Image: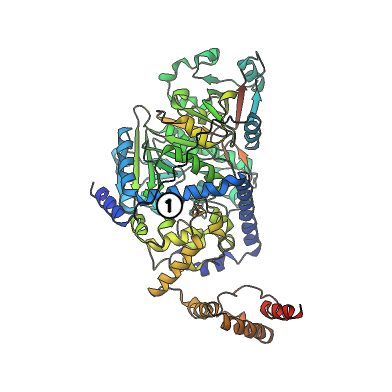
Amino acid sequence: MSSRNAILAAVKRNQPAALPLPEKEYTSARKGDIEKFSATLEGIGGKAYMLKEGEDVLAVISTIFPEARRVVSVDESMEIHYLKEHLTIVHHSLQDVDVAIINAQFGVAENGAIWVTEDDLKIRVLPFICEHLVAILDVNTIVPTMHEAYNRIGSAEYGFGVFIAGPSKTADIEQSLVLGAHGPKSMTVLIKSL
Amino acid sequence: MSQAAGKDHAALAEKFNKDEERVNWHDRTLWWIRQKRDKAAWSLGEEWEPLREEASKIKAHTLSNLSEYLTEFEKNAQANGITVHWAADAKEHNQIVNSILTEHKIQQIVKSKSMLTEECHLNEYLKHQGIDVIDTDLGERIVQLADETPSHIVLPCIHWKKEEIGELFHRHLGSPEGVIDPAFLTNTARVHLREKFLTRRIAITGVNFAIAETGEFVVCTNEGNADMGAHLADVHIACMGIEKLIPKRKHLGVFLRLLARSATGQPITTYSSHFKKPKEGKQLHIILVDNGRSTQLGREDFRNSLKCIRCGACFNTCPVYRRSGGHSYHNAIAGPIGSILAPNLDMRQNKDLPFASTLCGSCSNVCPVKINIHEQLYQWRQVLTEEGHQPAAKTVAMRAMATTLSNPGLFKVAGKAGRWAMKLMPFMVSNQFNPWFKEREMPEPPKESFTEWYQKNRKKK
Ligand code: SF4
C-alpha cells in the first residue's frame, strides 16, 4: 500500500494544472457500408460471404469446410454443432476444434472487425483456439467507424469483449505475411441480409 | 541491454554498419512499413489530422488529472474483481510478479508482448528465481531463443533474416535444416507454442489502454497470443505503466483508429481484447508501474513523451534508427521516443541517446499523439550539456556548429570556407575527428552556395 500512496502523491505533485478534455461527440446514426466492410475484411485476409435468401447456414459451412471433423457453436440453434456441455467442458479440450461458429453483435466497415463479448462466446478462448472461425453477422448492424462502434457498445456490461478483424496473423519473419500464427488460419463472415 | 552495457550509440551503430548490405536491407524494410503507414493514414483523408489532435488532447488532459484517473481506475477495476498492485519501480514490479507465482507454486509461465516487462528486465529477474518464461509473440520468441532482446517495440526481430531464423529453429525447435520458408517456420513456432499455452497456468500480458471509467483494459495483438495465454491460464497478470490510462471507453474509438494504422498500416490489429472481469473461478491481476513516469510528468519539457502509445511509427521513419538498428540504443525502448524516455531513467547511462538523431522532425510528423519528439531530443541535449553529460566527441564540433547555425553572417562565411576546405583538404572534413562525416562519402562541394547563386540571379533579373 505504501507504494500506492507514494506514487499517487508524486503524480499529484507533478501533474500540470488541469487541461480540458475535448468533448467531441460521435453520435452519427450513419449506417456502415456493406461493400466497404467486405472489401476491408478481404483486404486483411478474411472472407466475406453474403448469404442468399433462404440459404442454410449449416449447409454453407459444410460446403466451405468439407473436411472439418469437429465443428462447434455455443448457439443452440446451431443444432448438431451445439456444444451442450459448454458450461462444464475443460476449455483446453477445444484445441482440436476445426471450425467454431459465433454470432457477431455488429461489424465495423472501416476495418472489417466484428464485436463479440463473453455472453456470445460463453467460452472466452473459443474464437482463438479453433483452426477456422466463422462469424454470423446481420448486415443491418454494420457501423461505419470505431466511433459509432463504441457508441453502440455504450456502457454495456461484459467480462470480456473483443474486436476480431480477420484470421490470426504474423509478419515477424522478414515481413512475410503468414495467416494462422496462434489462432485461426481463416475467418469467414457470413452476412445475413434479412 | 547486457550486450550493449557501457557502450554508446555511435560505437554500437558503427558495429551495425559493418555489414552494409544488411543495413540497406534493414533500412528498406522499415521504410516500406513507413509507406504502409502513410497509405493507411491517407485512407482516412481529412479525418486523420483532427484525430491526431484529439488523441493528443485526450492524453494531455489525462496526464493533467492522472492521480484522479488512477484512483478511479483502481476503484472500478477492484469492483470488477481485478486485484490491483502498485509498483514504484522495476524491482518492485518484478517482486510482485514473483510473489504471485510463488503463491501459486508456479515455475513456468507464458508471456505475451509487454515493453514494460522489457523495461523492468523481468525475464532476467525471473530466470534468476528459477522461473521459466516463454515469450509467445513470434518475434519475441525468436529473439528470446537467440538470447537477445527486441530491437523494435512492434517488430521485435526486424533485424533477423529468415536464413538465420531457419537455423535458429533447426537448433532449438528441430525444424529441418535449411528450411527458411516463413510459413513453415511460423507453423513450427505455432506447434511449439501451442503446447506451452495448453500447459502453463499463469500468463502475463501487457496493456495498450486502461479505462478509468470502467476499470477495464485493452490488449492489441495480431497473433492472438495474449488471448491464448490469458484465456487458458488460471491466473492472468497484466503489467502496465501508469501513463496507459485514458478516461472513457468511448476514447478507445479515437486510439484504436490511430494505433494499428500508425504501427503497421493495418486498419486495426486482428484482436483488440477488452478485459473487464476475471473469468469465473480465475484470477486477474493488474500491476500499475511508475518507474520514473511520475518524475517525467514533472519535467515540463518532457512531459509529453508520456502520451506515447508505443506504435513504433517514429522508429520506422527515423533515418538514424533505420541505419543503426534497435540494439544500438542500448535501451528496452529504442528509436526516437526511447531516446527521450531513457535519460529520464538514467541520465548518465543514456546521455548519448538524444544525440542519436538528425532532428529532421520526421518522427514528430508521424506521431499519432503529436508528441514533439525532435524538439524534446533537442531539449535533452541542452539539459545534458548543462549538467556536463554530453558525449565528448561531439562537444567541440557541436558547439562550433551551434554557434554557426545561430549566426547567419558566420554561416555564410563558414559555408564559403567549408566549400574551399572540402575542395582543397577533403581529409580535414572527412577525418575521424568529425563525428558527422564518419563513414560517409562526402558530397561534391557545390561551386557556389545558394546565397551566392540567388544574389547573382536576382541581380540579373
Ligand atoms: S512517440 Fe509517437 S510515433 Fe513514437 S512510438 Fe510513441 S506514439 Fe508512436
Give residue B350's position: percent from left, percent from top.
Answer: 43, 66
Q: Amino acid at mark 1?
A: Glu
Q: Residue at x 64, y 85 (%)?
A: B421
Give residue B133's position: percent from left, percent from top.
Answer: 42, 45
Q: Is residue A103 above or below residue B37?
A: above
In the orientation shown, which residue stands out farthest toward the left?
Answer: A2
Subunit of mark 1? Answer: B
Res B7 seen here: no
Relative to B47, B58 lies left or right: left
Give residue B108's position: percent from left, percent from top.
Answer: 39, 41
Relative to B271, A193 lies left or right: right
Q: Quadrant of residue A183?
A: top right
Image quarter (top left, top right, bottom left or bottom right) of the C terminus of chain B: bottom right
How many C-alpha atoms fall within 10 Å of the one at disc 1: few (<14), some, or many (≥20)? some
Which residue is label 1 attached to? B118
Image quarter (top left, top right, bottom left or bottom right) of the N terminus of chain B: bottom left
A91 or B67, nearer to the observer: B67
In the orientation shown, which residue stands out farthest toward the right?
Answer: B460
In the orientation shown, which residue stands out farthest toward the front?
Answer: B461
